[in-house]
Image: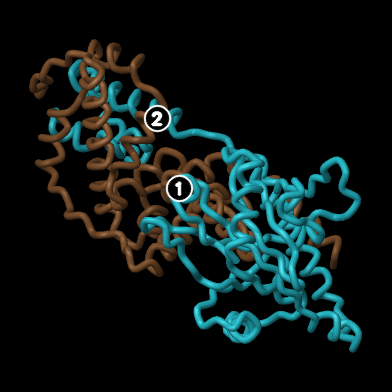
Amino acid sequence: MAADARASRREFETLLEPILGPLHATAVRLARNRTDAEDLVQEAVMKAWKSFATFERGTNFKAWCFRILTNTFISGKRSDKRTIKAAPLLEGSDVADDLSQESFSADEWNRIYPSLVDDDVKRALDELPDEFRVPVLLSSLGDLSYKEMASALEVPIGTIMSRIFRGRERLRAALKDYARERGIVLAPTPGRES
Amino acid sequence: MRCPEARSFLHPFLDGELEVDTNVNVLRHLDLCASCRERFEDERRLLARVKTGLAEPCPEPLKMRIFDALAAEERAASRGAGRIITWPRLAAAAAVFVVAFAWVDPICLRGCPTVRALTREHHSAAGEQLSESEAVERAREVLGRDRVVCERMGDGSWCCREARSCDGGGCVVRFSCKKRGTISFVKLPGSDVHPWLSYRAGEGLIVTRQDGCRFAGWRENDCLYGLVADESLPPEQLVALASRLRVEK
């Protein structure tokens, strides 16, 4: 019995170790505070360990852990009485309009990219409201599919798509602003539709 | 496929969420349309930059804390599987001890003109298997406080503390429990006793925890009082603060 428990823990630790970095990085951006982030990661890992028997071998362990991390974060927020506010869905035509407005040209990108530092990215992400920040984070660091995010956040897939799109567009706009603050001249992006 | 439609698939395309047929149609459009290709490439670069910008390793102390907690859970599970309840074991399990110390959020410590962060903690013994409400009830009784917060430790015991906040300019002091098994003791020259039980403020004994934080405090009437702060606060300042707290107390 003890040998089984030890083997199970070793298996869990082997799967866990490579994803602790992304889990922690995500928690830091979710909690916006390192102390809370560490508590969040530890709580999520212990929950994952307690339900490890239900984890289907061969499926995506990383996505499974990220789902638990997200649920832990959200339930913590709910107990704080600060629920994630619903964001309005974006219509298809709005998506296309916005996409044509905020993109960088190759030349602009080449000027912005060297000036960007990791803190810019973190700052831009931290400034996003939760409803955008969470899906953007989960898609960037967690490898969660839209379906898995929809399930974790208890919203329809269309809402996830809309939030990912809007979150990334806000990120882009913020990074552009930071570049402007540094004196990089960016021309207004021309319409590009053919 | 025309540009607006192709661009509406931008994110699902980059996230690998499109059905095969749609994916092929988007790829065909990108072959023909330079401006959409540029737009898609731009987004791909942005996402890659976001991913690298957010990446950071898990701190070693946290990793150790997690693996320690997992090992403790495993030991508890193994013990539980073949447990024979004996009276001496029950008696040992019923023994409780009270320690007291405060976690001062380092941010608060820097911004807070007056540190009043003394609190007491009550630990139930591992193996007692109390429910949260039982732990809260007992902690209220032992600590003599109504506002009590209990936290489950990796070994199944409960760590309960008085819920208080810093009164210095509205900043928040966060009290946290000593997580048993996550503290490393540093014995300083001249000390011949265990610092956890023997520290007296002003003598320069400081406990460095595995998470890099330092604890300075003193033992009094079976309680341990003190402060925890991160390494940005110089040890002598931490000791001075602990001494001040002792005097104020």
Q: Is residue A109 left or right of residue A5?
A: left
Mark 2, residues whose alpha carbon is within 10 Å: few (<14), some, or many (≥20)?
few
Q: Which chain is cyan?
A: B
Of all chains, the one bearing label 2 is: A
Q: Residue at (48%, 58%) from the top-left corner?
A: B173
Q: What residue did someone put label 2 on?
A: A119
Residue B88 is situated, as x and y percent measured from the top left of the image, at: 91, 85
Of all chains, the one bearing label 1 is: A
B228, above or below B81, in the image? above
Mark 1, residues whose alpha carbon is within 10 Å: few (<14), some, or many (≥20)?
few
The CA span between labels 2 and 1 is 14 Å
Q: Nearer the viewer, residue A22 or A53?
A: A22
Which corner quadrant of the image does residue B224 belong to? bottom right
| Residue A33 tag number | 1
For chain A, the rendered hue is brown
Under mark 2, the amino acid is Asp
- N-terminal label among 2 and 1: 1
Residue at the farthest bottom position: B87
Q: Nearer the viewer, residue A28 or B196?
A: B196
Residue A167 is situated, as x and y percent measured from the top left of the image, at: 27, 42
Residue B124 is situated, as x and y percent measured from the top left of the image, at: 71, 76
Q: Please tell me whether mark 2 sits on a helix, a strand or a loop.
A: helix
Q: Nearer the viewer, residue B176 or A86?
A: B176
Under mark 1, the amino acid is Asn
